[in-house]
Image: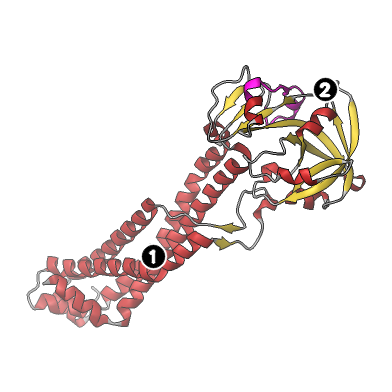
């Protein structure tokens, strides 16, 4: 009986009911959308790092430390034969790393110079574009961010200065042959890429490399004294950043949920207190106070169910569209040193959807129960007369 009365009350309230339902639905949508954008941003950064740097893992020279350029001078040796075989079968690629300086338009810019296997298809770096070069200069591939910073474009030439394996400084003329667009600033800013065979000759390091990246379809176990770095190890810095940022994500979720709860609470409380006369009439007709509280709690639950259904019907297609085509961002965050896509795709996990719907449902139950419980304690005559004491 109470359920039927609750349905009639909601239908009889007309536009007020649907406004409450719509506001609640918008709150659910904003919580899911914002959390999905945040999750999508973190997942994109992880995927880009794997796609452009890590692949299936790598073998490092024992002295190599990518965060300490001083180690570059000693972190090279002849590539182990087992890794050379993988490179020749296109299942791995070699990278030789060294410090250098470039002089575009008379300015000095310190860079990390990396020689890479041009025929590779393992990393999402357009190294094959260098194969099209037919000039006599050192062919160079740089990123869009590096191009903006150095004001270098395709066809521009500049002096490159480096130190070879004999601790002798040498220089040559480099030429930009291609500018790549990459979301990963770690392979863009401060980096120049060139053929590994050319760089080996420049540095007098024939057949040597610093690290070897292998395909994710293979899993070599050892390569002499070279150290194997699996995907879990190579993305540890990204996972650490995400873990440290998790409290921020939780705080954003709580803030959005609190704002939604405040809106729901205000609308629901106002609706119930405006119906004091109705509550007083029900009690005067003999309805027990517990049933009065239960009646309005059921109405709150129905509001929550209607809001969830409306979210699925009204905002579900919009959330699906964003999950497929993404959301264009107004600025390029790569200039700030952030791995954020120009068109960010939100990710909505099932725990997020279920937790949000469940929490909003419980909030509506609570904000329906508390005001109606308070009013039910009033004397029926006072409730009918609209007294608040």
Say which label, 1 or 2, has the lower sequence index. Answer: 2
Element under disc 2: loop
Q: Which residue is mark 2?
A: 165
- Quadrant for the N terminus in the image: bottom left
Q: Which residue is mark 1?
A: 262
Taking 298 as reference, is 250 left or right? right
Where is residue 233? Give x, y as percent. Answer: 55, 31
Which range is magenta? 65-83
Element under disc 1: helix
Where is residue 2? Give x, y as percent. Answer: 13, 71
Q: How many marks?
A: 2
Whether the magenta-drawn stretch holds residue 81 is answered as: yes
Where is residue 310? Give x, y as percent. Answer: 35, 70
Identify which residue, 185 or 297, lies in the foreground.
185
Residue 16 lies, with reference to residue 330, above or below; the image says below
Mark number displayed over residue 25 = none
Quadrant of the image occupied by residue 292 = bottom left
Whether the magenta-drawn stretch holds residue 75 is answered as: yes
């Amino acid at each position: 009986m109470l359920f039927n009365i609750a349905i009639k009350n909601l239908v009889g309230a007309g536009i007020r009911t649907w406004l409450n339902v719509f506001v609640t639905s918008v709150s659910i949508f904003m919580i899911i959308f914002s959390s999905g954008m945040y999750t999508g941003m973190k997942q994109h950064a992880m995927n880009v790092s794997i796609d452009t740097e890590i692949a299936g893992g790598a073998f490092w020279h024992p002295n190599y430390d990518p965060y300490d350029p001083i180690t570059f001078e000693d972190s090279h040796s002849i590539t182990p034969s087992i890794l050379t075989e993988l490179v020749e079968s296109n299942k791995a690629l070699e990278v030789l790393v060294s410090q250098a300086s470039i002089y575009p338009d008379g300015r000095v810019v310190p860079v990390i110079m990396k020689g890479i296997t041009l025929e590779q298809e393992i990393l999402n770096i357009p190294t094959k574009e260098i194969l099209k070069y037919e000039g006599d200069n050192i062919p160079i591939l740089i990123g869009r961010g590096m191009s903006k910073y150095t004001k270098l474009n395709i066809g521009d030439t500049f002096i490159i200065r480096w130190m070879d394996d004999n601790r002798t400084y040498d220089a040559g003329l480099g030429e930009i042959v291609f500018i790549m667009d990459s979301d990963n600033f770690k392979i863009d800013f401060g980096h120049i890429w060139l053929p590994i065979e050319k760089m080996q000759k420049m540095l007098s390091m024939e057949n040597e490399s610093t690290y070897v990246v292998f395909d994710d379809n293979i899993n070599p176990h050892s390569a002499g004294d070279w150290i194997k770095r699996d995907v879990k190890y190579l993305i540890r810095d990204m996972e650490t950043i995400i873990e440290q940022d998790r409290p921020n994500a939780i705080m954003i979720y709580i803030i959005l949920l609190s704002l939604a709860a405040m809106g729901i609470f205000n609308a629901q409380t106002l609706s119930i207190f405006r119906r004091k006369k109705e509550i007083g009439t029900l009690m005067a007709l003999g309805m027990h106070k517990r049933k009065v509280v239960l009646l309005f709690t059921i109405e709150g639950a129905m509001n929550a169910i209607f809001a969830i259904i409306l979210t699925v019907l009204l905002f579900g297609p919009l959330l699906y569209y964003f999950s497929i085509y993404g959301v264009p961002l107004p600025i390029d965050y790569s200039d700030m040193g952030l791995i954020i896509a120009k068109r960010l795709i939100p990710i909505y996990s099932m725990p997020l959807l279920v937790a949000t719907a469940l929490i909003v449902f419980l909030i509506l139950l609570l904000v329906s129960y508390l005001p109606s419980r308070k009013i039910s304690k009033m004397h029926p005559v006072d409730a009918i007369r609209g007294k608040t004491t």
